[in-house]
């Protein structure tokens, strides 16, 4: 059977790439160290596949067809279309159709109804963390899109349930693959709103504390209430709670948190204990 | 409340920014955008347009159409109702 070998989360602010030369050196160093730490932990876990949980930033989907959850079930996916990601090194992005379809089938059997895509275009939400983690080789990717941009969005409790379903699906997959889950986005930020540029550090710190405490009920309640006032980008914390559910709702370990006004985002980086062990860099 | 055709225009401009910048009126003619919203587009009226589209699409549209971040944010803040205006936002420029 497949094995869940790592669970992680990372912010994906586009300006981390687009405006990198303009960032203060102290922020460059913190961000670089955080991405490298995640990359080292991921490399130590030796995943064959990474299920990447991210929003779609109006690339694949529009308001005429807007899935709540979409699983990329194709053999390959397109790389990022954003001009500032033209140097993204892995195109096309290798998929894992068999595992993706197993996740989909497991979901249907448990009365979850995701959408599917046989060829998805993976934007900065997927590709910036994968790129900046500096992996030598990109494992196969199963894209897992959560709508965190446009209401109606899935409830936080449903996202937690999706994480648990991912955990069960990986455990029941009849293959020897080593599988990681990487959630991207968050923490607080505001895009295209009058509050654009604001970072809610108190929300971010409380959010981190709630993940660290791990208890599902208080975490779900905190996010349902707190995301309403922490900028529309904070809704990407739904991806983090998918990861939390996949990790068994325990073992959260903060890699770093740094509020970076120049990229508009309270940037968070974390891993979770999986199966009673914390994956550390070799 | 989302305006479908305005949203569709913004969605499409992301992938055709050069065409839009080259001839905005010609591009706009492909979409049955309401006259008052077409006027707001030609005037780069961030506040009016913000009421009819997703905030991310609004941000991507103005980035693709060439407005600098600082100016976009300035106009966003100026458009906010007094009771909901942000107390303070972080400095800098860009998007997230």
Image (tube, rainbow, N blue to C red):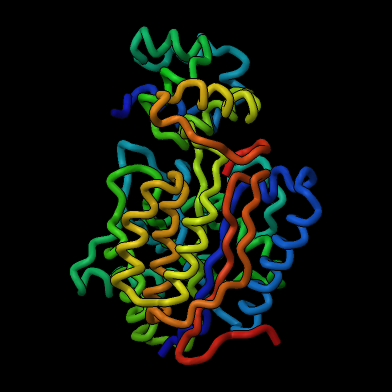
Q: Quarter of the image holding residue A173? A: bottom left
Q: Would you place residue A178 above or below residue B89 in this image? A: below
Is A166 left or right of A79, judged from the image as shown? left
Viewer-proximal residue, A209 or A30? A209
Judge whether residue A91 can be spotted in this image: no
Q: Is residue B2 left or right of residue A208?
A: left
Q: Residue at image x 59%, y 84%? A: A45
Q: Residue at x 45, y 90 (%)?
A: A275
Residue B33 percent across, percent down from the top left:
36, 15
Q: Nearer the viewer, residue A225 or A161?
A: A225
In the image, is residue A174 above or below residue A110?
below
**Residue B59 visible (yes or no):** yes
Residue B83 drawn at (x, y percent):
39, 28
Identify the image quadrant of the C terminus of chain B: top right
Residue at 52% x, 28% y is B61
Q: Is residue B60 above or below residue A180?
A: above
Q: Quadrant of residue A214?
A: bottom left
């Amino acid at each position: 059977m497949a094995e869940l070998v790592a669970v992680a989360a990372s912010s994906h602010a586009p300006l981390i790439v687009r405006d990198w030369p303009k960032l203060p050196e102290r922020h460059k160093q913190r961000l670089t160290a955080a991405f490298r730490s995640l990359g080292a932990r991921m490399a130590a876990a030796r995943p064959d596949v990474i299920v990447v949980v991210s929003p779609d930033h109006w690339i694949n989907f529009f308001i005429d067809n807007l899935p709540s959850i979409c699983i990329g079930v194709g053999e390959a996916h397109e790389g990022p279309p954003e001009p500032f990601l033209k140097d993204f090194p892995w195109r096309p992005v290798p998929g894992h159709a068999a595992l993706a379809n197993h996740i989909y089938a497991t979901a249907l059997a448990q009365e979850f109804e995701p959408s599917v895509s046989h060829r998805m275009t993976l934007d900065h939400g997927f590709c910036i963390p994968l790129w900046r983690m500096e992996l030598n080789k990109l494992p196969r990717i199963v894209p897992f899109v959560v709508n965190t941009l446009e209401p109606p969005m899935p409830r936080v409790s449903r996202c937690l349930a999706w994480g648990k379903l991912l955990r069960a699906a990986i455990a029941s997959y009849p293959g020897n693959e080593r599988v990681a889950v990487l959630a991207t986005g968050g923490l607080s930020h505001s895009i295209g709103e009058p509050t654009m540029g604001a970072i809610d550090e108190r929300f971010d710190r409380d959010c981190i504390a709630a993940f660290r405490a791990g208890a599902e009920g208080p975490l779900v309640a905190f996010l349902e209430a707190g995301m309403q006032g922490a900028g529309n980008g904070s809704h990407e914390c739904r991806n983090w709670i998918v990861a939390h559910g996949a990790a068994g709702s325990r073992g959260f370990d903060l890699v770093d948190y740094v509020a970076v006004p120049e990229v508009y985002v309270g940037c968070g980086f974390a891993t979770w204990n999986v199966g009673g062990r914390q994956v550390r860099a070799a | 409340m989302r305006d479908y055709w305005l949203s569709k225009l913004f969605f499409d401009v992301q992938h055709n920014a050069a065409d839009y910048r080259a001839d905005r009126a010609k591009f706009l003619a492909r979409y049955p955008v309401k006259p008052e919203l077409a006027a707001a587009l030609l005037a780069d009226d961030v506040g009016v347009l913000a009421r009819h589209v997703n905030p991310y699409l609004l941000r991507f549209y103005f980035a693709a159409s060439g407005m600098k971040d600082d100016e976009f944010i300035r106009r966003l803040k100026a458009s906010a109702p007094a009771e909901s205006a942000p107390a303070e936002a972080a400095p800098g420029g860009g998007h997230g």
